[in-house]
Image (cartoon, rainbow, N blue to C red):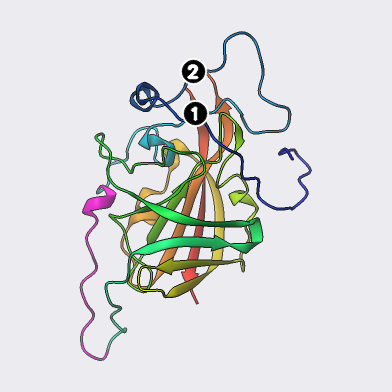
Amino acid sequence: MTRNSSRVPGRALRVPVLVVAAALLVSGCAAAPSGDASPSEGVQSSTTAVESASEFAPESAPEATPPAQVETPAAPPAGGVEVLPEGVAPTAVSIPAIGVEDTLIDLGIAADGKMEVPVDFDEIGWFTGGGKPGGRGPTVIAAHVDGLAGPAAFFRLDELAAGDVVSVSDVEGGVTSYQVTEVVTVEKAEFPTARVFGAVPGDELRLITCGGYFDRDVGHYDKNVVVFATAV
């Protein structure tokens, strides 16, 4: 199955991925195969490699508070909006509409101050500096769109639509269901950092991957796909 302009919905492809050398992580991307070989027809870019943390952030960070330092809103006065608990650390995510069901790894802050991304193309990660299911969000989950071997964990993320349900399991055995409210594709230079990582009073979810055009010259995609969802 490949991605093309007239996609037919189906099960997500779970393609084995390559182990990426540490040098590629430092450089932020892998070099394209030698020679003039072009990506497989219809696939966004089978030559894409792990990008640096900038994969899910703007090309140049905006003048905004880093995700890990976003302030939590003050508790409302007595009689106001209900104050949610801290939440529980997530362990797995299920997205039936695009055939995704997998455990989560932890993602922290990289050396450049941006959010880490999974090393393995098939892994899905949870940003530990953000919210947790059941608490004040947003809970941020990210994965790659494709890799050297083809489609990766979030290859079909842009197929989600308002109303689709995403379920997140936690370490206590609970499951929080979220309903998609919006799916946007944005230029990396215009990544809505505050809206994605900023504190919110309710339990919300963000799913992030890359999208748009893969630029071989700079080694990454020019856009991000962001899914916004609210607990139901």
Q: Quadrant of residue 190?
A: top left
Q: Quadrant of residue 57?
A: top left
Quick check: is 193 in the magenta stretch? no
Residue occupying image coordinates x 59% and y 51%: 157
Residue on which disc 1 sits = 49
Residue type for callout 1:
Ala
Label 2 to label 1: alpha-carbon separation: 8 Å
Residue 228 placed where, x, y %? 49, 60
In screen coordinates, is 5 left or right of 53? right
Contact, CB < 8 Å: mark 2 with mark 1?
Answer: yes
Residue type for callout 2:
Ala
Residue occupying image coordinates x 28% and y 80%: 83
Report helix, strand or loop for mark 2. Answer: loop
Residue 91 placed where, x, y %? 40, 61
Quick check: is 67 in the magenta stretch? yes
Assign the magenta stretch its main secondary structure.
loop
* Total number of numbered discs in the rendering: 2
Residue 118 placed where, x, y %? 41, 42
In screen coordinates, is 36 left or right of 118? right
Depth check, front residue: 191 or 102: 102
Q: Which residues are magenta?
A: 66-79
Residue on which disc 2 sits = 31
